[in-house]
Amino acid sequence: MKNLFKGLLCLALLVSSFSGQSKDQKAPASGLPPLIDREVIFGNPEIAGAQLSPNGKYLAFLKPWKDTRNVYVKGVDEPFAAARQLTTETKRPVAGFLWTRDSKAVLYVKDKDGDENFNVYAVDPAAKPAAGADAPPSRDLTGLKGVRVILFSVPKSDPDAVYVGLNDRDKAWHDLYKLKISTGEKTLVRKNTDRITGWDFDLKDQLRLARSGCPRRPMSWSSPPFLTTIRGAITGTKVLKPI
């Protein structure tokens, strides 16, 4: 009987100790700010990635629709409440978009149900949706399977073009192409045999700078004459020969 009493007493003390620890853990420490809700940091933004159209008439931006980020557009003088929906993605958010230089289309990439094979689509910001539709139709400019397309740049000198990357030749690296928006015709600009991860053009739409993914060449290469005068000061810089 005495041993049973001692056992019950020890059990009561143990439960009391755990209860006290639990209360201490739940109570916020004195003087510390309250915890920030996860939704504030990781939730969808109300509006993101706004871009003014080259002609200055429209403002396109990303906004959640059915809990998924999509592209919206509005006139620069219109309120955000009057914005029109341009895409209707529900399974994966639109990561980003570009205006064409003539402001006649918004370009964006999307895959099929998260398969990571992205194609380029174009949508007319001035078009109206068909009856019963939430957004105007988008046009697939590439229509490729098993290939990931990357948007790089839209040239000022050719409003009907966009520079894109395609990994159709080598799944690991993207070759640089010039894509004709009106027809979908692709022209190879440079084959990527140097592990290039990004291409940049100057104000005259000349290919000038390339970002390398090779650890031994951490900075960039360039085509003449942009970095030729300072290539010795930049690690991994190399002059590319024109094709």
Image (cartoon, helix red, strand yellow):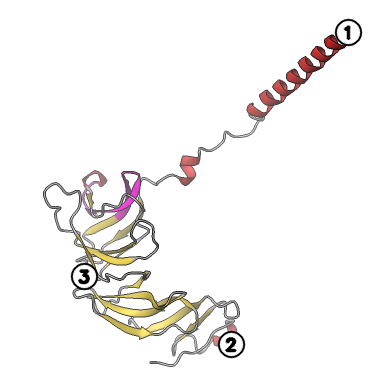
Q: Is residue 93 left or right of residue 141?
A: right
* Label 2 or label 3, whichever comes before in sequence order: 3
Direction right: furthest residue: 2
Q: Residue at x 35, y 84 (%)?
A: 189
| Total labels drawn | 3
Relative image position of residue 170 (x, y in whole percent): 43, 78
Where, quadrant-wise, is the C terminus in this rendering?
bottom left
Q: CA distance from mark 1 to mark 2?
A: 88 Å
- Secondary structure category for the residue under label 1: helix
Which residue matches tag 1?
A: 2
State which mark lies toward you, 3 or 1.
1
Q: Residue at x 52, y 87 (%)?
A: 238
**Quick one: label 2, few (<14), some, or many (20+) residues within 10 Å?**
few
**Quick one: label 3, few (<14), some, or many (20+) residues within 10 Å?**
few
Residue 6 or residue 13, whichever sits in front: 6
Which residue matches tag 2?
A: 232
Does the segment drawn in magenta span residue 68?
yes
* Label 3 or label 1, whichever comes before in sequence order: 1
Q: Is residue 79 above or below residue 213?
A: above
Q: Is residue 201 visible?
A: no
Q: Is residue 124 above or below residue 151?
A: above
Q: Are marks 1 and 2 in contact (CB under 8 Å)?
A: no
- Secondary structure category for the residue under label 3: loop
Q: Is residue 21 left or right of residue 126?
A: right
Q: Which residues are magenta?
A: 61-79
Which residue matches tag 3?
A: 102
User: What amino acid is at disc 2?
Assistant: Gly
User: What amino acid is at disc 3?
Assistant: Asp
Where, quadrant-wise, is the N terminus in this rendering?
top right
